[in-house]
Image (spheres, helix red, strand yellow):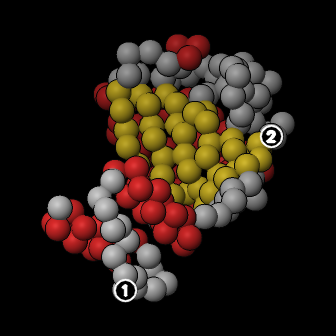
Amino acid sequence: MTSSVSTLRLIARTTTTSRTISKPLVHKFHPLATRQILNKHRNMSTSTSLNLSSVVTENAPAAIGPYSQAIKAGPFVFLSGCIPLSPSGNVVEGGIEEQTTQVLKNLKAVVEASGSRLDRVVKTTVFLKSMDDFASLNKIYSEFFGTHKPARSTVEVSRLPKDVLVEIECVAAT
């Protein structure tokens, strides 16, 4: 039991940044009491309210399902996956380079509608129908992002909406 109380003291000291607790947090070790006390102290320094708002632009195609083009949450904007649709909603014909160009135009339009810019993109996730298109995707991708290199994951998938070749989602700072 002494070991548990010591552990609680250590946790309490590391989770409260504004002051050190001099008295033991728990006189009797009880899991529910421990959880309530730790949550109370943890919330003292981390509680904030988060405003969420949808981003909508006519410069990119409307969402093709029950989701937003993007959501602003605090200092970030989270973009849904963009696929190679024209702003009117038609699939752009062509290979990976043409489709990647349209995807990145759509992504840029939504990012800018949120009040951000491509050089504020923090992370992208790329979904490719074939990893054989990786080099062609990178060529177009680097033209859009230039010297800015956000964190990125690229995943090969078996199928994408409307049978397109590429989809890209991202997170940007506002």
Relative image position of residue 2 (x, y in whole percent):
17, 68
89 with respect to 95 (left or right): right
Work out whether residue 56 can be spotted.
yes
Of 116 and 84, the residue lying toward us: 116
Quadrant in the rendering for residue 9: bottom left
Q: CA distance from mark 1 to mark 2?
A: 52 Å
Other-residue count near label 2 (Cα within 10 Å), few / some / many at <14 / 14–19 / ≥20: some
Residue that numbered label 2 is attached to: 56
The three-letter amino acid code for the residue at tag 2 is Val
The quadrant the C terminus occupies is bottom right
Relative image position of residue 78 (x, y in whole percent):
61, 46
109 with respect to 10 (left or right): right
Residue found at x 25% / y 67%: 5
Of 64 and 136, the residue lying toward us: 64
Work out whether residue 101 can be spotted.
no
The three-letter amino acid code for the residue at tag 1 is Ser
- Label whose residue precedes the other's in the sequence (1 or 2): 1
Quadrant in the rendering for residue 130: top left
Relative image position of residue 165 (x, y in whole percent):
48, 23
Residue that numbered label 1 is attached to: 22
Considering the numbered disc 1 on the image, is that residue within a helix, a strand or a loop?
A: loop
Residue found at x 56% / y 70%: 44
* 166 is higher (above) or lower (below) than 32: above
The quadrant the N terminus occupies is bottom left
Relative image position of residue 118 (x, y in whole percent):
61, 57
165 with respect to 61 (left or right): left
Quadrant in the rendering for residue 12: bottom left
Other-residue count near label 1 (Cα within 10 Å), few / some / many at <14 / 14–19 / ≥20: few
